[in-house]
Image (tube, helix red, strand yellow):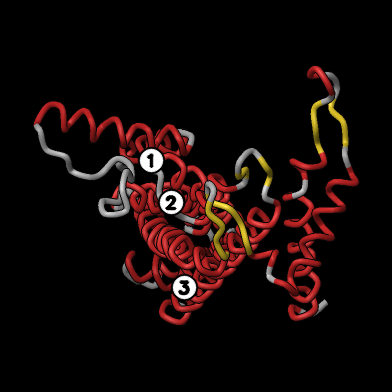
Amino acid sequence: MSKAKQWTLMIPGMALLVLILAAMPLVIKAGDGGSAIQLAWSQGAEAFKGYFAGIGDGATFRFYMGSNQYLFWDRIGYYFKTSLLYVTSGALLGTAIGIFAGLYFAISKRGWIKSIIDFLGSLPDFVFILLMQFGIVWMASKTGVVLFEVATLTSDDPAIALPLIAMIVIPANYMIRSVAMQMRLTLTEDYIRNAKARGLSRTYIVFYHALPNVLPFVKGDLHKLMGIIMGNLFITEYLFNNKGVTMLIFTNAFGDAVYQYNVVVNGLLSFLVLYGIGYGLLRLFIFGLRKVFVR
């Protein structure tokens, strides 16, 4: 099957999956008195039909924030740009740092640095973020100097640096370990030994012989890397209280105790657009690396 046909089937399939997932809070309900879970398929079907019926008159794109009604298109811009900054930074900088740091760790004999990387990689995302926040608070209590904002309290003073660090370090850590492992395996191949026998420098061998054969593994890992980045986006925006797409979903899914199916669907579709942009940029980045280093 051609790539075009795959995408033609994949995009509607992903949109349908979003519609189904967003309906789960309506379908899955606890029974009376906390008894066994009940499935209200009719409510899910009504929400599904109502979403498409409301496209014509615009009801699908109206939602409540508190007691005020807003148009989704008027609000999504700021939230989308915030999330886009985190996704693109985490994807491009995290991958670039991960690839080149992974090359270094593959040939370095400094085991203690590898131990630190392995330790950081073993920490769950939310633990790493909380440790950064606690570290900033502890330093501020000891020195009176606040290096970075630990959370966004007002729109005039948002937390920027720490969320960016979290979005970059976590995917970079994954990429470092993946690239280092593939590079070590590649450096044991016969053509690498032949290159050494020809007297080529180690730097030339690493970048122009080994790296081009590692990049296909990196390319094949991009969907997993984007999954890590998008999962990290949920945690980062929530813990730092940053107004991104995920916070738009979190804070408005239940307006006045009423589940707003439309805003959840629209938010998740925006989330998929972020995924697509991040993945596309990573494919371009890997393509550029191959143009530079493949001989």
User: x%, y% of residue 264?
Assistant: 65, 53
The first of marks 1 and 2 along the sequence is 1
Amino acid at dot 3: Phe
With 140 as the anchor, is 18 left or right in this view? right
Q: Is residue 218 above or below residue 27?
A: below
- Identified at 75% across, 81% down, the residue is 4
Question: Which residue is denoted by mark 1 in the rendering?
Answer: 117
Query: Separation of disc 1 and disc 2 at Cα?
Result: 8 Å
Judge by depth and name the residue closer to the eye, 220 or 160: 160
The first of marks 3 and 1 along the sequence is 1
User: x%, y% of residue 168?
Assistant: 39, 53
User: x%, y% of residue 48?
Assistant: 82, 57
Is residue 191 visible in the rendered structure shown here? no
Judge by depth and name the residue closer to the eye, 92 or 20: 20
User: x%, y% of residue 49?
Assistant: 84, 60
**Secondary structure beneath disc 3?**
helix
Any mark on residue 285, and which? 3
Amino acid at dot 2: Ile
The nearer-to-camera label among 3 and 1 is: 3
